Image: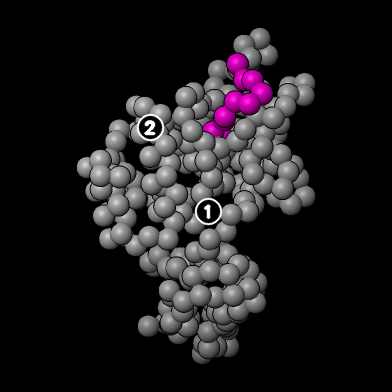
Amino acid sequence: MDPVHACFKEKIGEVLLPGDVFSFRLPESGDGSVKTDKIICGPGLRRNGEEVQVCKSGILRHKPPNMYWIDSQQRRYVPAKGESVIGIVTAKSGDIFKVDVGGSEQASLSYLAFEGATKRNRPNVQVGDLVYGQFTIANKDMEPELVCIDSCGRANGMGVFGADGLLFKLSLGLVRRLLAPQSEIVKDLEKIFPFELVVGMNGRVWVKSKTVQQTLIMTNVLETCENMTSQQRQTLFKRVAEGSL
């Protein structure tokens, strides 16, 4: 096994702390050049030259062949370009909507950033509405900017939503598990009740079921998934589906 991957793989599943450093410098080759291994750093890891620094406490995770990230129970959200989030419209100033996305400052959303929107045909967006959008600008020096259209100008599931459902907050780690392809939690949930689910990378989750009671049950079940093992979760979901809770 490559010595660079070996030093990382020894730590997979272990708790790492901010300040831990991994070196990615390989021995010099015959021509005197130095090789560095290609590693993809996810959340919680930062590449600095030939080193990778841990900048968030949590458990080191790995996805073959060479992706690593820190799985943490963080609740504070830091906007990142390209992430899809659930926001709450808080104000309208001129042609711009101000949207609370759970970060340190509000994001801006242009009225033209909706499918089919023009200067004459403005979208019907009111203060208090929920919007599902994507960051096009998100860095520490600029105000975050949201859009509700993809690169082709299509809504593609984004825009104003949320009639009759319930909005609540989960940890960012659990949200990533819900958004994972073929998520086991979502598959198990589908066996309980029919429901609609919208999950934002900022930790906000919106759920709607046939009745208010079923919606509240789904909310409580999701909140309890945080620290459960797969077996505990399936046992709980089975009891809920049978109506014994």
Classify mark 2: helix, strand or loop: helix
Q: Judge from the rendering whether residue 229 lies leftward or rightward of residue 76; answer left or right.
A: left
Residue 154 position within the rendered picture, expressed as x and y whole percent measured from the top left: 50, 26
Residue at screen point 61% across, 47% down: 81
Which disc is residue 213 wearing?
A: 2
- Disc 1 marks a residue whose amino acid type is Leu
Does residue 81 lie above or below 18 as drawn? above
Residue 54 position within the rendered picture, expressed as x and y whole percent measured from the top left: 60, 72
Q: Which residue is mark 1?
A: 172
Question: Mark 2, residues whose alpha carbon is within 10 Å: few (<14), some, or many (≥20)?
Answer: few
- Quarter of the image for residue 218 reads top left
Q: Judge from the rendering whether residue 187 lies leftward or rightward of residue 41; answer left or right.
A: left
Magenta stretch in the rendered image: 124-133
Q: Judge from the rendering whether residue 183 lies leftward or rightward of residue 49; answer left or right.
A: left
Q: Is residue 132 magenta?
A: yes
Question: Mark 1, residues whose alpha carbon is within 10 Å: few (<14), some, or many (≥20)?
Answer: many
Kindly report which numbered mark, 1 or 2, lies closer to the viewer in this rendering: 2
In this view, the residue in front, 16 or 121, is: 16
- Disc 2 marks a residue whose amino acid type is Gln
Residue 150 seen anywhere in this rendered image of the structure: no
| N-term mark: 1 or 2 | 1
Q: Residue most toward the top?
A: 120
Residue at screen point 48% across, 71% down: 60
Residue 59 seen anywhere in this rendered image of the structure: yes
Residue 240 position within the rendered picture, expressed as x and y whole percent measured from the top left: 28, 44
Q: Judge from the rendering whether residue 144 lies leftward or rightward of residue 41; answer left or right.
A: right
In this view, the residue in front, 159 or 216, is: 216
